[in-house]
Image (cartoon, helix red, strand yellow):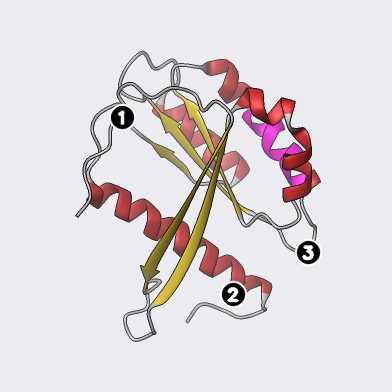
Amino acid sequence: MGKEFSTVNAQPTLGIQTTNVYWPVRVNQPNKPLFMFRLDFWDVGYTSSTRYDYIDSDSMDSVDMIIFVISAADRESFNELAALIEEKRKQSSTNRPFVSLIFITKFDQYAVLTDSDAKEFQARYNIPVYLFSNVYSNMRLATSYLNLIAEKLYKRDLELAGQVLS
């Protein structure tokens, strides 16, 4: 079932890369039906986001989640993160807020960020922060993050509908 994927030689995204994933989840409710999520990932590199800024502004009304990915070796990106999140929130629809997650990569090598930096950011802005090491990842780890994404989206949709997770 699939193969391991590596982040060892990961490079910044040039252009825009899209990936569709169909993901079945029970959403932490064993007696509930299985939901099939269609997750559309848009990986937009910095250069493309500035060159094709109309894509960013046009898509913000319908975006469900933004995963902010930064490197632990880049304090400048970390320092700019709060302003970037606020900018995206201002661009989004007020009656349909998006879910935010932060993934910090390369946490095991050349990290200028500390675990306490990540915890402090998470506490201050109430946004979950996940730390990744620069090693091969297995499908089990990928599965747990896809489940996490689906569960966060499901919870957000229930909140928008005025329902409570039971």
Is 73 a magenta residue?
no
The kind of residue tagged 2 is Leu
Residue drawn where x is 31% and y is 80% of the image: 30
Disc 3 marks which residue?
95
Identify residue for label 1. Answer: 133
Q: Secondary structure at mark 3?
A: loop
To which residue does mark 2 refer? 158
> Local crowd at mark 1 within 10 Å, few (<14), some, or many (≥20)?
some
Tell me if residue 81 is in the magenta stretch: yes
Instruction: From this view, report whether residue 89 is shown above or below residue 12.
Output: below
| Location of residue 80 (image quadrant) | top right
Residue closest to the eye, 47 or 153: 47
Label 2 neighbourhood size at 10 Å, few (<14), some (14-19), many (20+)? few
Q: Is residue 162 left or right of residue 93?
A: left
Q: Which residues are magenta?
A: 80-90
Mark 1 or mark 2: name the one nearer the start of the chain: 1
In what element is the residue under mark 2? Answer: helix
Query: Would residue 45 be found to the left or right of residue 132 on screen?
Result: right
Residue 151 at x, y = what percent?
46, 64
Label 1 to label 2, Cα distance in Å?
A: 33 Å
The answer to whether residue 36 is left or right of residue 67 is left
Residue appearing at x 73%, y 32% in the figure:
52
Mark 3: few/some/many CA within 10 Å (<14, 14-19, 20+): few
